[in-house]
Image: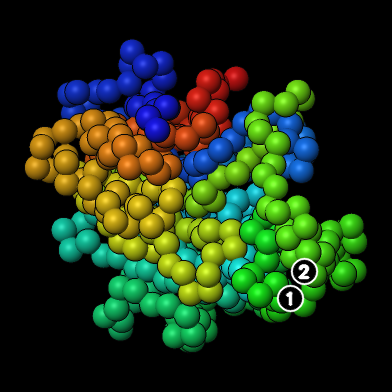
Amino acid sequence: MTKTSCFSHVLPHSKQVARKPANHGPTLLIHGGAGRIVKKKIPCEEIPDEQKEEYLQAMKEALKVGCDILKRGGRAVDAVVAAVRVMEDCPLYNAGKGAVFTRSGKNELESSIMIGTPSHPAGAVTLLRTIKNPVVLAKTLMLDPENSHVFLGGEGAEKYAREKGVEVVDPSYFWTEARWKEHLEGLANEGGNDKGEKRDSCYGDKSESDDANNSLPSYDDVVNKGKTENNTKREPVGSNGDWFYMNSMGTVGAVAVDADGVIAAATSTGGKNNKSDGRIGDSPVIGCGTWADNETCGVSGTGEGEFLIRYTLARGIASRMEYLNESVEQAASAMIDLLSKVGTEAGVVALDKYGNFTIQYNTSGMFRGYIRASDEIPHAYIFPDDVDD
């Protein structure tokens, strides 16, 4: 696997890197996950091509909301939270409302946030089942003067959220038909669990409920189908059609620098589809999925979480800038190349205090975008060959 795509600073490539410390002013980057994203039809994954525009518009909305804060002289931390909240509230992305399910049919969300000032304030939360916007809870934890912790999870994190007035929702809020279908299909491809018994969901069998698509299979159907078909793989990508298919790692994130040169980064996710209950990925782990340091860079990552943790992706980029005197583009490229060599998929958005930025990924596509307060024009892309309208 080799690194396939990137862009840095601005398009085209000949203008990618500003080697001199020219200050581009407040800048915001976002991403909505990297993964296998193609413009072809796969029979069991028929997503209309027009849905591409829905993804782009959702990213542009997030960029505009965050930029509005920056252009008014607001803080980078508020801009990244605002942008991530938009994506958490959008069912298209695997974070917040659009979170995937665990193997047992639950949602477990996680998020982290960091500010690049010398004390490196940070907050991280995981294993959340009732928090509408995990990034808000992470920020609350980070800025709470009565709190000395960086990382909270599970029931303790949710109890803290209720005490601090962070919005709590019923677990059913996170149920969406699309994610439930992915969940069931994932079980079918696995052939169910080892014993083939039906799994219980905290929502019951939604495939038979009034608000679900009655054509979706039950757990028993899914398990039996998986066994009888012997886990038959899907038709390869490349069949005829003009459909848009997305199988992303499903993480959202934002990085920003404000007028004071302060950098902030935030990341939020629902994790892997059909992950084990209690699994924690890179997104809430400071230094892996999220990092911010005013003297080097801010980073939000996406990809195969276990590898991003092992290779401390986000901090690794900052370390290369600090110790090897590399630019943000060089450092990010080197880390993505490293992950490519070990055969895993990843993507990052990263910027320095001057507003120089890079977006690097080794997958067939990545939901990504940027905006500068100087012109307030949102730029959003999915495929490597995407250009501005």
| Place of residue 66 in the rendered image (x, y in percent of width and height, measured from the top left) | 48, 47
Look at label 2 and name its amino acid. Tyr
Could you tell me residue 75's position as x and y percent?
Answer: 35, 53
Q: Are the residues at dot 1 and dot 2 in contact (C-beta closer than 8 Å)? A: yes
Instruction: For marks 1 and 2, give the CA distance.
Output: 6 Å
Characterize the local packing of mark 2: few (<14), some (14-19) or many (20 or more) Cα atoms within 10 angstroms: many
* Residue nearer the viewer, 178 or 11: 178
Q: Amino acid at mark 1?
A: Lys
Which SS class for mark 1?
Answer: loop
Residue where numbered disc 2 is placed: 219
Question: To which residue does mark 1 refer?
Answer: 198
Tell me if 18 is positioned left or right of 158 in this view. left
Residue 50, quarter of the rendered image: top right
Based on the displayed image, in which of its 4 quarters is residue 1 positioned? top left
Residue 178 visible from this viewpoint: no
Which residue is at the far top?
A: 14
